[in-house]
Image (cartoon, rainbow, N blue to C red):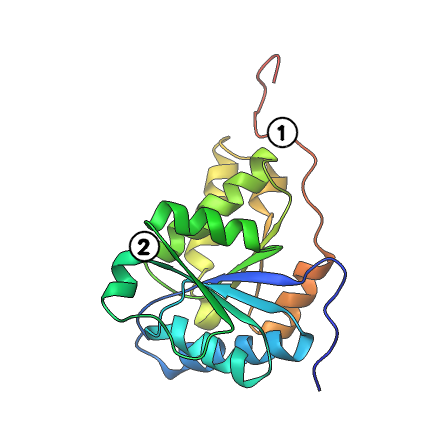
Amino acid sequence: MILAPSSRIRSIAVFCGSNFGNSPEYGDAARALGAELGRRGIRLVYGGTNKGLMGVTAEAALAAGAEVTGVITRRLHERGHLAAGLSSHEIVADMRVRKARMAELADAFIALPGGLGTFEELFEVATLTQLGDHSKACGVLNVRGFYEPMRAMLALATEQGFMKPEHRDMIVAADTPGPLLDAIESWTAPTVTKWIAQPGS
């Protein structure tokens, strides 16, 4: 059964690896997330390719009845990386335009395990939330504890005076898709500025 989308979260951008990782649990988690998006009637926005966890998530979302929009760079499209059967897709000039367009289309963001691109995408949208450029939830699917080092790094940055606790805790995390999506639905944006003990900030 496909549920009606919530009034707040109708579209989620998912960032994840274009490789599969070394454990089948990563693919299982990507499939579970795609299926849960479909069950809740939430549109998936993603990078448009058929590679790695990106392709797995899209296939599962489509199979579960979700609308899936791919935003792919021209270079990747020309290499034949566009996934088949997407609800819609856009071809954009480069990665910078791709990220901006995905952010425009999404009401919230989720990162699965991945590499440099995944980390960069997640931290960019989280930074935009921190700065108040948008007020969109960011979450991570913490498969096999993949994002524990990131959470430790954010805790260290807070301890050392580079972040406020509200921003340390801003990226929600869960081990499975259901609780993660529930947390994103109930999330509220921090109301503090990023600056610490600086006059006029």
> Dot 2 corresponds to which residue?
116
Q: Where is residue 3 in the image (x, y as percent from the top left)?
A: 73, 78
Amino acid type, mark 2? Leu
Extreme residue in the top direction: 199
Q: Which of 161 and 21 is in front in this view?
A: 21
> Dot 1 corresponds to which residue?
193
Residue at horizontal 30%, vertical 57%? 74
Q: Earlier in the sequence, mark 2 or mark 1?
A: 2
Residues at discs 2 and 1 in contact (Cβ within 8 Å) = no
State whether residue 152 appears in this view.
no
Q: Nearer the viewer, residue 179 or 73?
A: 73
Note whether 122 is above or below 22 in the view shown: above
Q: In this view, does 136 lie to the left or right of 102?
A: right
Callout 1: helix, strand or loop? loop
Q: Position of residue 184 (x, y in %)?
A: 66, 59
> How busy is the neighbourhood of tag 1: few (under 14 within 10 Å), some, or many (20 plus)?
some
> How busy is the neighbourhood of tag 2: few (under 14 within 10 Å), some, or many (20 plus)?
few
Amino acid type, mark 1? Thr
Residue at horizontal 41%, vertical 76%? 26
Residue at horizontal 55%, vertical 49%? 104
Q: Position of residue 158 (x, y in %)?
A: 52, 38
Q: Distance between the residues labelled 2 and 1?
A: 27 Å
Note whether 81 is above or below 193 in the view shown: below
Q: Where is residue 110 in the image (x, y as percent from the top left)?
A: 53, 61
